Amino acid sequence: MSVVYQKSRGLTDVSTHYCPGCTHGIIHKLVAECLVELDILEKSIGVAPVGCAVLAYDYFNCDMQEAAHGRAPAVGTGIKRVQPDKFVFTYQGDGDLASIGSNEIVQVAHRGEKISTIFVNNAIYGMTGGQMAPTTLIGQKTTTCQDGRKEELAGKPIKISEMLATIDGAKYIARVSVDSPAHIRQAKKAIMRAFQTQLEGKGFSLVEVISSCPTNWGKSPVEALNWLRDNMIPYYPLGVYKDWEAE
Amino acid sequence: MAKGKTTFDELLCKGCGLCVEVCPQKIIAIKKDYVTSKGYHPAYVTDSEKCTGCANCAIMCPDSAITVERD
Ligand SMILES: Cc1ncc(C[n+]2csc(CCOP(=O)(O)OP(=O)(O)O)c2C)c(N)n1
Ligand code: SF4
Ligand code: SF4
Ligand code: SF4
């Protein structure tokens, strides 16, 4: 018998602090597997966010830098500009990227910065205990909208992929999910494409990953993925929103 | 002879149950009467003869706790 699946060497031996069944862990695996399969782990520098993934620097088996809340794209820009031969990625949640860091992500795309972003959209602020995020769905209950998000008060949930796809400097934008083995395989292909976009020097790339937060959604890991399928995917359609090769 | 073989790393498993849901052979369960040193009820294979080595369980595991071998 031969090994067909094992823990990626793109990850360290550390056991993560993520809650049981949190899909941050699946997304970490995919990023790590892509870095190994593209043979760029040794020249990769990742930028960790503020949010549940704040300790990602302990989990990815490459050089890592922590950034202030929402500022990973600016930090990634600096790293890439002084070390253009390195592969640079940011890993950011929806509070980090779509709220406090919304300006940073728009500007990094506008500049066509040659870095790649993994955007984890779990429709809530996980780390701080479940507050409303810009991505929280209408009617979804959080600690800061206890009767559910209302459009009159908070507007509709922000669609980052659709928005960034309108920007010239963004060369690859896709939205994927990790709720099933089939979707996980598709997600990996998208991350591969995003990373190749940078390696070929085309410009900015981002993959939005629809993710779960069982703890703050108040659901079991399995129920959380059912909720994600029934509620998040209809509002956040999966697909490739921009691809330089198709243009 | 089983076509596939799965090994679970008890120190990585958090007993989340996601692997249980995606196994097409329905041969993964959670050990309710046992607690790991990390404080979780871990996953295990109930009937190893039926494993096809499809790796669905391992692909789904957020904690990379599963290694899969296949013929
Ligand atoms: C400048 C600043 N403002 C606010 C916070 C508090 N804070 C920490 S994490 C976070 C939001 C995290 O949510 P998200 O980015 O969605 O990541 P998740 O935890 O859900 O993975 C906030 C508001 C902070 N650490 N720094
Ligand atoms: S709080 Fe939510 S996002 Fe954070 S580790 Fe737990 S389940 Fe994951
Ligand atoms: S998916 Fe992984 S962590 Fe969750 S129960 Fe199965 S082996 Fe354990
Ligand atoms: S490899 Fe496939 S058949 Fe075997 S335990 Fe995992 S999911 Fe089930």
Image (cartoon, coloured by chain):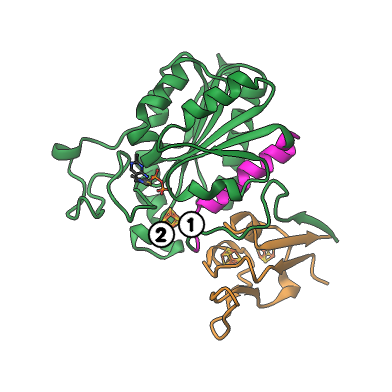
Question: Are discs 1 and 2 less than 8 Å apart at CB?
Answer: yes
Across and down, in percent, residue A190 comes to 58, 34
Q: Residue at x 60, y 77 (%)?
A: B37
Which of the pair B27/B34 is nearer the observer?
B34
- The chief SS type of the magenta part is helix
Across and down, in percent, residue A32 comes to 65, 44
Q: Is mark 1 within 8 Å of ligand 2?
A: yes
- Residue type pointed to by label 2: Pro
- Residue type pointed to by label 1: Cys
Determine which quarter of the picture holds residue A105: top left
Which chain is represented by orange in the image?
B
Instruction: For mark 1, name the chain.
Output: A
Is any part of residue A240 visible from this angle? no
Q: Tell me the element at label 2.
A: helix
Marks 1 and 2 belong to one chain: yes
Which chain is represented by green in the image?
A
Question: Measured along the vertical axis of the image, is residue A91 above or below residue A74?
Answer: below
Which of the pair A237/A212 is nearer the observer?
A212
Q: Which residue is mark 1?
A: A22
Marking on residue B62: none
Determine which quarter of the picture holds residue A220: bottom left
Residue A117 lies left or right of residue B1; in this view the side is left
Measure how far apart labels 1 and 2 are at the Cα level: 6 Å
Q: Is A40 part of what is drawn in magenta?
A: yes
Question: How many numbered marks, from 0 up?
Answer: 2
Q: Which residue is mark 2?
A: A214
Which of the pair A69/A10 is nearer the observer?
A69
